[in-house]
Amino acid sequence: MKVRIIDAQTAVTCADGTSFTGSYRLVTTLTDARRHPATALVGLYHQRWEHESAYYALRHTIMNGHNLRSGDPAGIEQEMWSLLTLYQALRTVMVGAGESLPGTDADCCCFSIALHTARDQLIQATGIVTADSDRDTLLGTIGRRILAGLLPPRRQRVSTRKVKAPMSRYSVRHADGRPDTSRTVTRLDVTILEPVDQSPTPPTTSRNDRHVTPAARRRHRILGMLQKEPTHLWQPREIAAHFGDITLGPCTDN
């Protein structure tokens, strides 16, 4: 798969005057730099946590924390598709409502209002769609309710990543410069780093030994070395050093 790698350096300034920098590397399949500028993609990368809102809407807002009712795989699959269809339909209405008011961010549209309005339409038997005009009326009602209860713009915040589960094996974290408590961001500067050519230097001689005698081939020599010392626990690095692998880099453990 062909991908595009974007390296960026970010500088964050908080409301209390503190600042820190961070590095990001984004790998994306959006390879057209003209259609998808690097700066725009890095800006969207900071909103990657938005998918958590989708999980919350499905599990808590729509399902209210309840489990699926079906007791067989086919029924569960049907319920999942119905939930995803409902979620996508409501999100489509929310986007349409936001676009009808120029300058409105879709994040300001409340999912709970859209869900409760649609539910009221069904309970009151006013949500039965029989014609295109009725469909427009239904969507218009939900859209008007959404626009009447727009949420305030989301403020940019920053804090260090924390593990909420007390028994998690990832509870130990390293200091990354970000504050322990959430702080409001007043300025965010993003600098796109130019790619650096890190192509390895090709070897001076070829290692293709298919045309040499079997006794001189690398595989035969390695097997002979292992047979001479059958009790020695050879490590790959030892074998590479013994045969002089010049492309072997230093080993680092993360």
Image (spheres, rainbow, N blue to C red):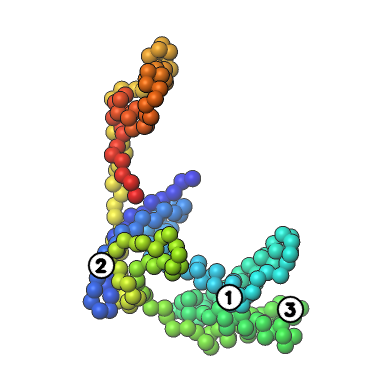
> What amino acid is at disc 3?
Val
Q: Compare residues 24 and 33 and report the one nearer the observer.
A: 24
Q: Earlier in the sequence, mark 2 or mark 1?
A: 2
* Residue at left offset 63%, top offset 84%: 117
Q: Nearer the viewer, residue 214 or 237?
A: 237
The quarter holding residue 14 reads bottom left
Percent across and percent down for residue 50 are 47, 69
Can residue 44 be seen at all in this image of the molecule?
no
- Vertical relation: 221 (above or below) 247: above
- Give the residue number, with chain letter if any, for mark 3: 129
Q: Nearer the viewer, mark 2 or mark 1?
A: 1
Residue to which mark 2 is pinned: 20
Residue at image location 65% in from the left, 81% down from the top: 118
User: Is the residue 33 above or below the residue 165 in the image?
Assistant: above
Report, in whole angstroms, how far the alpha carbon at label 1 lies from the one at label 3.
27 Å
Q: Mark number for residue 60?
A: 1
Which picture quadrant has residue 69?
A: bottom right
Whether residue 1 is visible: yes
Crowd tier of the residue under label 1, counting other residues whose Cα lies within 10 Å: few below 14, some 14–19, many 20 or above: few
